[in-house]
Image (cartoon, rainbow, N blue to C red):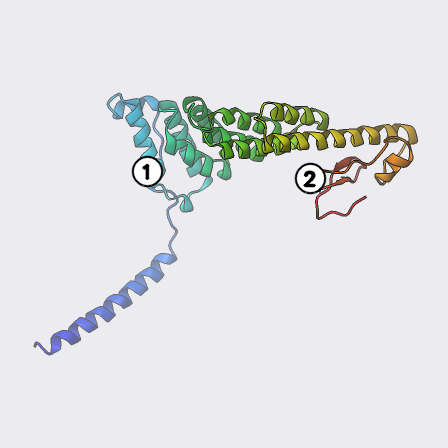
C-alpha cells in the first residue's frame, strides 16, 4: 500500500492537470463578463452619502474603491459611462481627492468620457491650490482632446505659480509657449511669449523665451509680406525669395533656433520642420 501511494499521487497530478487543461479550453470559448460587478450601477449621490452614514468624504472613498478595483481591460463604452459618473460623484463629494483626478486623467478621456474628465480635473484644480499637476492635465485635455491649444496654454500658465521646482516651472512655460504658437495668430503669439519672457527672472530661460518671441515676430512679418504679395500680384508666393525680390521684405530672417522658415501648400510662411525641404 505504501509503495502504491507515490503512483497514486502522480496519477492524481496528471488527472488534475488534464482536467485543468480541459476546463481552461472550455472556459476560453465562453463569453466573458465586461466590468466587475463593482461598476454595474451608480447610485444617486444622496444614496451614496446615506450609505456612508452621512459622511461625504467616506462616500468619495467608497466610490473610489469601486473605480480602483474595476478591470478596465474588460470594460465596454457603457461601463466607462458608469465609471465616469462615479468619478464625477467623487469629485463632487471630495474635489481634492488625489486618486480620482489621476485616474480620470489616465482613463476617462482616452475612452470617450472627455466631459467627465474635464469636470473632475477642474474640480481638482480649484480644490488643490498647492498642486500644479491637475492644471497640467486640465490644459492637456484642452490641447489634445478639445483641439484648443490656446486654452490649454492658459491653464498651463495658471499652474506655474504653484510649481516649487524651478526646472519644472521652466518646463511648464516651455510647453505653454509651444501651445501658444499653435493656438494664436502669429503676431498675438509673439506678444504672449514676449510677456512670458518679461515676467521670467533674468537668465538663460528668459533669453530663450525672448528668442522664441523674436522668431515669431519674424514669422509674422513674413506672413504679412506674403499677404501683401498676394494682393499685389494676384497669386500666392512660390518661394520666400519672391518676397525679397519683389521688395516686400528687406531680408529673409534667419531662425535663431535653426528650424528655418518655409511655405505651406497655400503659400503661407510657416516654421519649416527639419524633415521638410526648403522653399
Quarter residue 156 falls in: top right
Q: Quadrant of the N terminus?
A: bottom left
- Residue farthest toward the front in the current orientation of the protein: 203
Q: Which residue is mark 1?
A: 38
- At x 54%, y 35%, the residue is 171
> Which of 227/16 is in front?
227
> Which of 6/270 is in front?
270
Helix, strand or loop for disc 2 = loop
- At x 42%, y 46%, the residue is 73
Q: Residues within 10 Å of mark 2 (few under 14, many from 20)?
A: few
Q: Which residue is mark 2?
A: 257
| N-terminal-most mark, 1 or 2 | 1
Q: Nearer the viewer, mark 1 or mark 2?
A: 2
Q: Residues within 10 Å of mark 1 (few under 14, many from 20)?
A: some
Determine whether 112 is above or below 45 in the image: below
Determine whether 201 is above or below 112 in the image: above
x and y percentages locating residue 220 in the rendered image: 76, 29
Helix, strand or loop for disc 1 = helix
Label 1 – label 2 distance at C-alpha: 53 Å
Image mark count: 2
| Camera sees residue 196 | yes
Horizontal side of 81 relative to 275 (left or right) equals left
- At x 30%, y 25%, the residue is 57
x and y percentages locating residue 225 in the rendered image: 83, 30
Horizontal side of 238 relative to 109 (left or right) equals right
Quarter residue 3 falls in: bottom left
Q: Which mark is residue 75?
A: none
x and y percentages locating residue 109 in the rendered image: 50, 36
| Camera sees residue 148 | no
> Which of 245/109 is in front?
245
Q: Quadrant of the C terminus?
A: top right
Q: Are marks 1 and 2 in contact (CB under 8 Å)?
A: no
Amino acid at each position: 500500500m505504501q509503495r502504491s501511494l507515490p503512483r497514486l499521487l502522480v496519477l492524481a497530478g496528471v488527472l488534475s492537470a488534464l482536467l485543468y487543461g480541459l476546463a481552461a479550453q472550455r472556459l476560453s470559448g465562453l463569453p466573458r463578463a465586461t466590468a466587475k460587478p463593482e461598476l454595474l450601477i451608480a447610485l444617486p449621490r444622496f444614496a451614496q452619502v446615506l450609505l456612508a452614514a452621512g459622511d461625504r468624504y467616506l462616500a468619495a472613498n467608497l466610490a473610489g474603491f469601486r473605480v480602483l478595483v474595476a478591470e478596465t481591460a474588460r470594460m465596454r463604452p457603457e461601463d466607462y459611462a458608469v465609471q465616469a459618473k462615479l468619478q464625477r460623484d467623487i469629485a463632487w463629494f471630495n474635489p481634492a481627492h488625489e486618486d480620482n483626478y489621476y485616474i480620470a486623467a489616465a482613463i476617462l478621456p482616452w475612452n470617450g468620457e472627455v466631459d467627465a474628465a474635464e469636470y473632475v480635473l477642474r474640480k481638482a484644480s480649484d480644490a488643490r491650490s498647492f498642486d500644479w499637476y491637475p492644471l497640467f492635465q486640465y490644459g492637456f485635455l484642452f490641447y489634445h482632446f478639445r483641439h484648443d491649444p490656446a486654452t490649454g496654454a492658459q491653464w498651463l500658465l495658471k499652474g506655474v505659480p504653484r510649481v516649487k521646482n524651478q526646472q519644472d516651472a521652466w518646463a511648464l512655460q516651455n510647453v505653454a509657449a509651444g501651445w501658444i504658437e499653435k493656438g494664436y495668430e502669429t503676431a498675438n503669439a509673439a506678444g504672449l511669449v514676449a510677456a512670458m519672457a518679461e515676467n521670467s527672472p533674468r537668465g538663460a530661460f528668459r533669453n530663450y523665451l525672448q528668442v522664441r518671441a523674436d522668431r515669431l515676430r519674424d514669422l509674422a512679418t513674413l506672413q504679412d509680406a506674403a499677404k501683401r504679395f498676394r494682393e499685389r500680384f494676384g497669386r500666392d508666393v512660390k518661394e520666400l525669395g519672391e518676397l525679397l525680390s519683389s521688395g516686400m521684405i528687406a531680408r529673409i530672417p534667419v531662425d535663431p533656433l535653426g528650424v528655418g522658415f518655409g511655405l505651406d501648400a497655400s503659400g503661407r510662411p510657416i516654421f519649416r520642420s527639419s524633415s521638410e525641404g526648403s522653399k
